[in-house]
């Protein structure tokens, strides 16, 4: 087993991810018990919050201590993503399966590519902010993603175009590519190299 | 002998009086006034109230008040969580439990300081109601049982300040309970997303009696009506459509609004009981009783009947 796996698994904050999955499942159950349809906005909220719950795990409180060691920021981030992405992807699959199993009619929700783009944007934001604010970047990135989602949903209510309100849902490939490039640049250039 | 040794070995100093807690609350209120999140929430609320006008009967009525106060609720919650967690996440060493202004007093002051965002919300809600009156009112029902002059009642204007008080108090308390403010904010934001952007989940009987943001008008189905002209002229009635099988009446039901406000007061008493310091337990028990009375009374007066028809 890789030497980095256990320390990384222990360093990751799992509570927000567990909380988000629990609330997501409870929400689906309540909507079903209330005999309400599973609409697109509820799916967007439930699934993106599971993604943001995973992003909470990117916080790297020990970053300042290990920064001087010969382990690059890119490798530390890759380790965290390798630990975080599989369980979050599994949680999304389970939540989706619950939705399909519990409701006879399910409105179209965000696809896997759109969720990947949303998550990649959060990772890119975290990697970029780490260069500026250090260990607090994880919290700042999560707060920014929450604000982005809230603003997007509000703009959606105000009938703004989908590309403006939720660009990761409208152009997932573009957002994914931009986010990936930003992440790579942030973790391999300058002081983080 | 140093002061710290005295604290460790001596008796606990006397607590400060109520006057000092009020002074501290005034300081906290000023700190809330300088928090960016409060004003971001307020600006988003005003923006939503001014521009959100869905094209269905009663859509603008429910969106302008109370739903436009959703961003304000989230931002006051965040401000409360940051304020409540100040003892936890500060880089400074925490104040000793023996400090003259102890944790209970500080909690009380932080809760009382919420008077600032609550007052701001109340003034904004009144302003929205006044603007609505000047502009003529809101659309409810469909021709020939339609009006374009529906106005908010004073009872409905009280709901947003109560909602904000609840959100702020929850923020302060969760900020104090959670070791990391991020988890408090994340959990609160998730709940907020479900209560406001997905408000339609909860605003059906009987769930609408327990959701903090209860929308009006109630949609009361009229299964025995076959023609809209059978209904009394004073009613606002919608035709059957995609979301309703029967004709339905748009009804601003003031007894439900009044008891829902009572329910919110009870919730605030339960959450913010810490402000009562010595009477915390009694206030919390009284709050639970008020919550139960509020829920039962709403169900009892509900035009949907019980069980909901």
Image: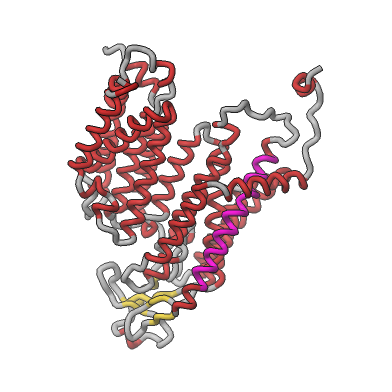
Q: Residue furthest front?
A: A190
Where does the image place residue B301, in percent across and percent down from the top left? 51, 70
Q: Nearer the viewer, residue B21 or B27?
A: B27
Residue at the (33%, 59%) spot, across then down: A157
Q: Nearer the viewer, residue B76 or A40?
A: B76
* Left or right of residue A88, residue B195 in this image: right
The stretch in magenta equals B105-130
Residue at the (41%, 76%) spot, across then down: B138
Q: How many marks?
A: 0
Q: Is residue B123 magenta?
A: yes
Location of residue A94 (image quadrant): top left
Where does the image place residue B49, in percent across and percent down from the top left? 43, 64
In this picture the colour scheme is: secondary structure
Where does the image place residue B150, in percent across and percent down from the top left? 45, 78
Q: Is residue A79 magenta?
A: no
Residue B82 in view, yes or no: yes
Q: Quadrant of the N terminus of chain B?
A: top right
Q: Nearer the viewer, residue B213 or B14?
A: B14
* Left or right of residue B27, residue A47 in this image: left
Residue at the (29%, 83%) spot, across then down: B226
- Which secondary structure dominates the residues rendered in magenta? helix
Location of residue B118 (image quadrant): bottom right
* Left or right of residue B292, residue A27 in this image: left
Q: Quadrant of the C terminus of chain B?
A: bottom left
Give above or below for B234 relative to A85. below
Residue A86 in view, yes or no: no
* Left or right of residue A4, residue B23 in this image: right
Residue at the (36%, 12%) spot, across then down: A69
Where does the image place residue B232, in percent across and percent down from the top left? 40, 87
């Amino acid at each position: 087993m890789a030497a980095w796996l256990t320390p990384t698994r222990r360093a990751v904050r799992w509570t927000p991810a567990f909380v988000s999955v629990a609330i997501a499942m409870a929400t689906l159950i309540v909507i079903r018990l209330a005999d309400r349809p599973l609409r697109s906005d509820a799916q967007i909220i439930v699934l993106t919050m599971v993604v943001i719950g995973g992003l909470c795990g990117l916080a790297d409180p020990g970053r300042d201590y290990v920064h001087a060691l010969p382990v690059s920021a890119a490798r530390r981030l890759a380790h965290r993503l390798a630990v975080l992405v599989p369980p979050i992807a599994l949680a999304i699959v389970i939540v989706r399966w619950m939705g399909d199993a519990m409701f006879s009619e399910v409105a179209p929700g965000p696809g896997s590519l759109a969720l990947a783009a949303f998550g990649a944007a959060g990772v890119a934001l975290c990697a970029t902010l780490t260069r500026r604010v250090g260990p607090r970047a994880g919290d700042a990135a999560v707060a920014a993603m929450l604000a982005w989602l809230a603003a997007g949903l509000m703009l959606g209510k105000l009938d703004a175009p989908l590309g403006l309100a939720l660009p990761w849902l409208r152009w997932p490939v573009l957002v994914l590519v931009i986010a990936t490039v930003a992440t790579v640049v942030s973790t391999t250039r300058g002081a983080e190299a | 002998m140093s002061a710290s040794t005295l604290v460790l070995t001596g008796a606990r100093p006397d607590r400060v009086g109520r006057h000092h807690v009020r002074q501290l609350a005034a300081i906290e209120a000023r700190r809330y006034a300088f928090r960016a999140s409060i004003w971001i929430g307020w600006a988003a609320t005003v923006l939503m109230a001014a521009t959100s006008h869905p094209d269905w009967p009663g859509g603008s009525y429910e969106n302008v008040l109370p739903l436009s106060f959703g961003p304000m609720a989230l931002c006051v919650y965040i401000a409360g969580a940051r304020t409540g967690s100040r003892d936890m996440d500060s880089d400074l060493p925490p104040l000793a439990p023996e400090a003259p202004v102890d944790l209970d007093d500080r909690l009380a002051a932080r809760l009382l300081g919420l008077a600032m965002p609550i007052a701001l919300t109340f003034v904004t809600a009144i302003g929205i109601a006044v603007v609505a009156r000047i502009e003529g009112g809101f659309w409810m029902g469909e021709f020939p049982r339609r009006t374009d002059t529906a106005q908010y009642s004073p009872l409905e204007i009280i709901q947003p300040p109560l909602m904000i008080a609840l959100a702020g108090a929850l923020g302060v308390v969760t900020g104090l309970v959670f070791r990391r403010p991020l988890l408090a904010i994340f959990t609160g934001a998730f709940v907020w997303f479900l209560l406001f952007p997905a408000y339609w989940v909860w605003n059906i009987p009987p769930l609408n009696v327990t959701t903090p943001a209860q929308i009006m008008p109630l949609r009361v189905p009229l299964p025995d009506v076959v023609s809209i002209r059978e209904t009394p002229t004073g009613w606002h009635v919608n035709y059957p459509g995609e979301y309703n099988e029967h004709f339905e009446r748009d009804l601003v039901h003031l007894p439900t609004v009044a008891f829902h406000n009572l329910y919110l007061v009870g919730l605030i008493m339960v959450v913010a009981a810490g402000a009562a310091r010595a009477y915390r337990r009694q206030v919390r028990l009284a709050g639970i009783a008020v919550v139960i009375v509020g829920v039962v009374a709403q169900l009892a007066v509900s035009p949907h009947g019980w069980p909901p028809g």
